[in-house]
Image (cartoon, rainbow, N blue to C red):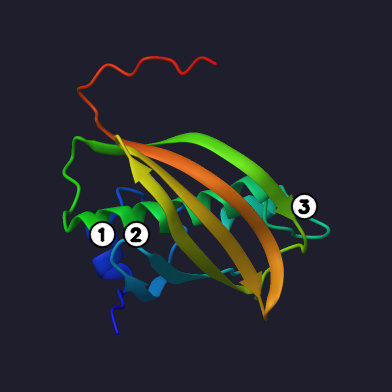
Amino acid sequence: MNSLDINQIKLYLPHRYPMLLVDRVLTWESGKTITAIKNVTANEEFFNGHFPHKPVMPGVLMIEALAQTAALLSFLSLGQKPDENSIVYFLGIDGARFKRPVVPGDQIRMDVEIVRHTRGIWKYKARATVDGQLAVEAELMCTMRNTNDDVAPVTG
């Protein structure tokens, strides 16, 4: 079984506290799937303002946690660790649905699978659950670039 602890995750993701949103990789299969967790604590900075009277994890951060999990799967599948010039950009989020609030004390289980990888574009199916209940699902699209590359705007 392939797993990663937080120190190994930091070798693949440039994010650091408070933006590193993956605590452990439970398992992954190259080119296919990954399962990771995020432990949500009352000490998360975003709970100070979202919302002080009823803390709820922002949906955009749940999507970000899924995207970080997807980026991990891509780097692991390629068998490469990013360098200081590597960056993963979001290209799209489709069909995002939020089904359950995530609150302090929850553990988010993130399951991501690669749907397709063509011409530098990765598409993933992503789901996050808490205690077996669906919290959020979405299809994500990303690309990996070098920070020295010019990034042309996406038009459509």
Which secondary structure, mark 3? Answer: loop
Residue 69 location in percent, x, y? 43, 58
Q: Is residue 20 visible?
A: no
Which secondary structure, mark 1? Answer: helix
Kind of residue at disc 1: Ser
Instruction: Give neighbour class at mark 2: few <14, some 14-19, many 20+ (Cα, 10 Å).
Output: many
Q: Is residue 102 visible?
A: yes
Kind of residue at disc 2: Leu
3 or 2: mark nearer the eye? 2
Tell me which corner region of the image, top left, top right, bottom left or bottom right, holds residue 76.
Answer: bottom left
| Disc marking residue 51 | 3
Which secondary structure, mark 2? Answer: helix
| Disc marking residue 145 | none
| Disc marking residue 77 | 1
Marks 3,2: beta carbons within 8 A: no
In what quadrant of the picture does the C terminus appear?
Answer: top right
Kind of residue at disc 3: Phe
| Mark 1–mark 3 distance (CA, rounded to whole Å) | 38 Å
Marks 2,1: beta carbons within 8 A: yes
